[in-house]
Image (cartoon, rainbow, N blue to C red):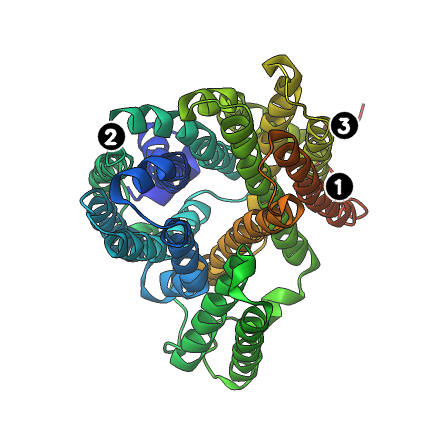
Amino acid sequence: MSTTSALNERMDARAWGVLLVLAGAVFLEGVDVAMLNVALPAIRADLGLSTGTLSGVVSAYVLGYGGFMLLGGRAADLLGRRRMFLSWLVVFLLFSGLGGFASEGWMLLLARFVTGVAAAFMAPAGLALLIGAFPEGPRRTKALGVYAGTAAGGFSLGLVVGGLLTSVGWRWVFFAPVLLAAVILVAALLLIKEADEPERPEGGFDLPGAFSITGAMLLLVYGVVRLEHSGNGMAGTLGVFAAGFALLAAFVAIERRSPDPLVRLGILRSAPFVRANLGALLFIGSFMGFQFLATLYLQEVRGWSPLQTGLAMLVVGVDTVLAPTLTPRLVNRFGNVPVLFGGMVLAVLAYLLFLPLGMDWTYAAMLPTMVLLGLAFSLAYGPLTMAATEGVDEREEGLASGIFYTSIQFGTALGVSAVTAVNVAALGDATAPAAKLDSLQAALLIPLAAAVAGAVITAFGLRGATAPERPEPVRVPV
C-alpha cells in the first residue's frame, strides 16, 4: 500500500513516521540556525575572526537560503520532491560537518552558504511532500500543526541546546545537526516512497528565469544584509538594490514570454496567498528581530551567559506542544484566518509589554512576553503555512512552498537587519550600559511595528473568513 493511501485511510504508525520525518527536517533547519547564533562569540574567540567575517557566517546562510528558495521549490515540482529532499539532505549533512572541522573563516563561510542552499532545496520539497500526503481537511490541519510546532520549536529549543553544546565546544554546534540529519535520512529512505510523487508538470526547465530570479534574490538579500553595517556606504547598498530590482523586472518579463515559466505569475493574483506570505514575512521578521535584541539585552546589558539566555527564552517553545494539539482544534472550530489573527494580536501585545525594559528587570517581568510569544507562534505559524498552501494545484505545491519559505527568509533578513541598523544608529559611539538600553528600546519599536502591520494585513482576510461547515442533522419526516 502506498504512503498516500495509508494516510488517507487513517493516521497509523507509518503515517506518523512520515510526518515526523518531514517535521524533523524542518526542526533541523531551525535548531541549526539558533544554535549557531548562540555559539558566535565562542567561534570568534577560538578562530580569531573579525566582526565582518563573523557577521558573514550568519549572512552566508541567509544568502544561500533566500537566493535559491524559489529555484528549489520549482525543482521539487519538476525533478521530484523525494529526490530533491533526500539529495539535498545529504548535502546539508556534509557541509554542516565541514563547518565543524573549519580552521579558518573562509571554510565557515563556504559551509554556511552551501548549507543555506541545501536548505533552500530541501525545505520546499519537504513541505510539498507533506501537503501531497495529507488531503485537505482536519487530517492536513493536524499534520501542519505538528509540522509548524516542530519548526518553531527548533528556533526556541536551539538556543538552549546551543548554549549547552557551546559550553562543551562550539564545534558540536555543527556536529549535532550532522547526527540528526543522518537519523532523518535513514528514516526518510525507509518511509517516504516514490508513490508519493504527483504527476509532474509538462515542459522543460526555465533556465533564463532560474538564473534571473536567483540573481535577483541573492542581490536583494545581500542589500538587506548590507544595511546592518553603516560603514558599507549607502551608495553601494542602493546600487545592490537597484541591480536586484532590475533582475527581478527581467525575470517578470521572461516569465510572461516563457512557454514553461519557472513561476506562473497567476499564482500571485490570489489575495489570500499574497496575504499569507506578507503575514509570514512580517511575523517571522518581527520575532527574529526581537530575539536578536533580547539576546543583546540579556548578555551584553545584563551579563547573562548563553545558557541562561537560552533558558530564559525556553518558554517560547510552548508552541511545540500547543501547535499540534490546540491549534488544529481551534482552526476546525473557528476557521484558519481568525486563529491566525489572534496569534498576530498576541505578538503585538508581547512586544508592547517588553518595551519598558529596565536595567534591573526580574525574569518575572519578562515572562509575560515570552509566554505570549509562545502562544502567538502556536496560533500563527501553522495557519500561515495552511493559508500559503491551501487551494494550490498539486503540480505547484513545491512552487507555493518555495515562495512561502522565501517570504520567511526575507522576513528573517529584514527583521535582524532593521533592528541592527536602528540599534547601531541610536547607540552611536556611546558605550555606557544606559545608552545601550536606550538604543535597544528604540530598536524594539521595529518588531512592534512589523507585528502591527502583520495583524492589519491579516485582518483584511477576516471579512471573507468563515468557520468550517458542520453537517446538518438529518431530519426524518413523520
The disc placed on residue 64 is none
Residue occupying the point 58% across, 26% down? 374
Residue 352 placement, left or right of 242: right
Residue 280 is situated, as x and y percent measured from the top left of the image, at 60, 48
CA neighbours of label 1 inside 10 A, class few (<14), some (14 to 19), many (20+): few
Number of numbered discs overlaid on the protein picture = 3
- Above or below for 324 versus 24: above
Of 13 and 446, which appears nearest the observer?
446
> What secondary structure is found at the residue carrying circle 3?
loop
Element type where label 1 sits in the image: loop
Q: Position of residue 281 (x, y in %)?
A: 60, 51
Mark nearest the camera among 2 and 3 is: 2
Quadrant in which the C terminus appears: top right
Query: Mark 1: which amino acid?
Result: Thr
Q: Position of residue 31 (x, y in %)?
A: 38, 36
SS label for mark 2: loop
Q: Amino acid at mark 2?
A: Gly
Quadrant assignment, res 353: top right
**Mark 3 = which residue?**
475
Answer whether residue 174 is visible to the viewer in this image.
yes
Q: Earlier in the sequence, mark 1 or mark 3?
A: 1
Q: Is the residue under label 3 in contact with that under label 1 (CB below 8 Å)? A: no
- Reading the chain from its start, which is encountered first: label 2 or label 1? 2
Q: Which residue is mark 2?
A: 169
Q: Considering only vertical position in the picture, is 229 above or below 366?
A: below
Q: Which quadrant does the N terminus fall into?
A: top left
* Label 2 crowd (10 A; few <14 / some 14-19 / many >=20): some
